[in-house]
């Protein structure tokens, strides 16, 4: 038992990092040496794999009783310039906790995939836990296997599996750190389902920049201060309204009031609906320009008398064209609105060549013929 005058140093964190700092383990109330090849380390790996495979977040705990003579009462501990031991600690155990995803997240992820939106998971969790959560919510599909899955099924080392033959990838932060920009670009282009685990905030920014290099429109969600650079760099930064920090909210373009991923998908659907309805309203408005402008052109060029005056045309625009154009903005979504691929921002603009050609060249000319026939 420790002395009353002794300080107790406790530490928690990623289990593998905690274990690396320990040289002993607490068993049945007694501290036992734990060499690098001990049976306890093998049991630790097995327990970690089992808990992480169930999608549970695992924390490791260790402690150490400091020498009362070297660290007496009132000793000034300094976290900046560390003046206390961080190695040679005693491993206490593991604790697993589960933060289950909301029930509507799998459906929201499936909607994203059908709409051509690539969902990437970037987390600080262990790769095993991250992969299990990604499979639960559908980021990694049921039929997709990672390199680790194939190696386990075939009973071969992971190094012998060709990464280009798998559709899903789980990338550890240490591996990402060793990748060049070209390697990362190849990873993103060759895999549809990707999970980045044990990543740092700086690596999150690198991932965003890599997607932008390939011409993708990137939306990033985050809630912490460390997420701010990635939120700022992304085309659309989305901060959490409830759990998010003030810094992340200031860096973001949008704040999610309910902290629910499904709300983002609903926003995408509403955005597509608004874009479609605006195009319908613009197309309807442009089609009436041909039959209204043509009489003036005929009057100027061929001296044909005007069938309608300017005031009459103004009344027609305000009285008959305005309200149908406004009503088109309230159209309901098409059944396939979330089955389309994302539009090309360079070509598919609100008013493009196709819309003008249809409005002026086709429907506008038909209206001109109909108006001419009714006038005659």
Image (spheres, helix red, strand yellow):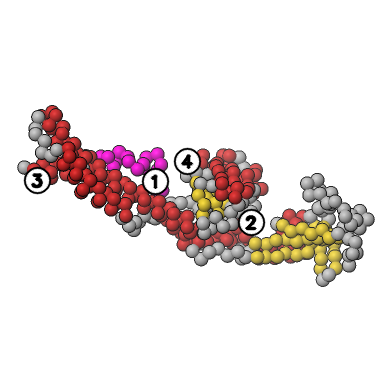
- Disc 2 to disc 4, C-alpha distance: 28 Å
Question: Which residues make up the magenta segment?
Answer: 341-358
Pointer 3 and pointer 4: residues touching (CB < 8 Å)? no
Distance of mark 2 from mark 1, alpha carbons? 33 Å
Q: Earlier in the sequence, mark 3 or mark 2?
A: 2
Question: Residue at the location (21% across, 48% down)?
Answer: 319
Q: How dense is the environment of label 2, judged by Cα within 10 Å: few (below 14), some, or many (20 and up)? A: many
204 relative position to 285: left or right: right
Q: Residue furthest front?
A: 311
Does dot 3 land on a helix, a strand or a loop? helix
Say which residue appears at 16% left-offset and 41% top-offset: 312
Percent from the top left, x then y, of residue 156? 63, 57
Q: Which of disc 4 and disc 3 is earlier in sequence?
A: 4
- For residue 326, say whether it is visible: yes
**Between discs 1 and 4, the one toward the N terminus:** 4
Residue for badge 4:
215
Q: Mark 2 points at which residue?
A: 125
- Mark positioned earlier in the residue sequence (2 or 1): 2
- Mark 3 vs mark 4, foreground winner is 3
Residue 374, numbered circle: 3
């Amino acid at each position: 038992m420790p002395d009353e005058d002794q300080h107790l140093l406790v530490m928690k964190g990623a289990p593998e990092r905690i274990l690396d700092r320990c040289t002993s383990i607490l068993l049945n109330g007694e501290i036992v040496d734990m060499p690098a090849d001990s049976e306890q380390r093998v049991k630790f790996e097995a327990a970690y794999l089992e808990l992480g495979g169930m999608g549970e977040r695992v924390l490791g705990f260790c402690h150490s009783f400091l020498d009362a003579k070297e660290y007496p009462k009132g000793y000034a501990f300094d976290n900046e310039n560390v003046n206390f031991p961080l190695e040679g600690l005693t491993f206490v155990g593991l604790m697993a906790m589960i933060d289950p995803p909301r029930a509507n997240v799998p459906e929201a992820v499936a909607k994203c995939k059908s709409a051509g939106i690539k969902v990437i998971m970037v987390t600080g969790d262990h790769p095993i836990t991250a992969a299990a959560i990604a499979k639960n919510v559908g980021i990694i599909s049921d039929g997709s296997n990672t390199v680790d899955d194939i190696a386990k099924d075939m009973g071969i080392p992971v190094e012998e599996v060709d990464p280009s033959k798998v559709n899903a990838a789980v990338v550890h932060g240490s591996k990402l750190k060793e990748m060049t920009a070209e390697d990362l670009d190849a990873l993103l282009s060759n895999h549809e389902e990707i999970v980045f685990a044990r990543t740092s905030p700086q690596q999150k920014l690198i991932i965003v920049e890599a997607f932008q290099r390939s011409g993708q429109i990137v939306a990033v969600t985050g809630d912490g201060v460390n997420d701010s650079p990635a939120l700022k760099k992304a085309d659309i930064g989305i901060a959490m309204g409830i759990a998010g920090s003030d810094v992340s909210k200031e860096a973001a373009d949008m704040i999610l009031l309910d902290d629910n991923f499904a709300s983002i998908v609903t926003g995408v659907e509403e955005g597509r609906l608004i874009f479609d309805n605006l195009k319908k309203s613009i197309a309807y408005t442009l089609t009436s320009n041909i039959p209204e402008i043509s009489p003036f052109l005929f009057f100027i060029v061929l001296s044909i008398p005007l069938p309608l005056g300017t005031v009459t045309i103004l009344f027609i625009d305000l009285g008959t064209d305005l309200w149908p154009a406004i009503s088109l903005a309230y159209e309901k979504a098409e059944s396939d609105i979330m089955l389309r691929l994302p539009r090309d921002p360079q070509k598919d603009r609100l008013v493009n060549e196709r819309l003008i050609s249809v409005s002026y060249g086709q429907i506008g000319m038909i209206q001109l013929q109909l108006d001419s026939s009714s006038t005659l």
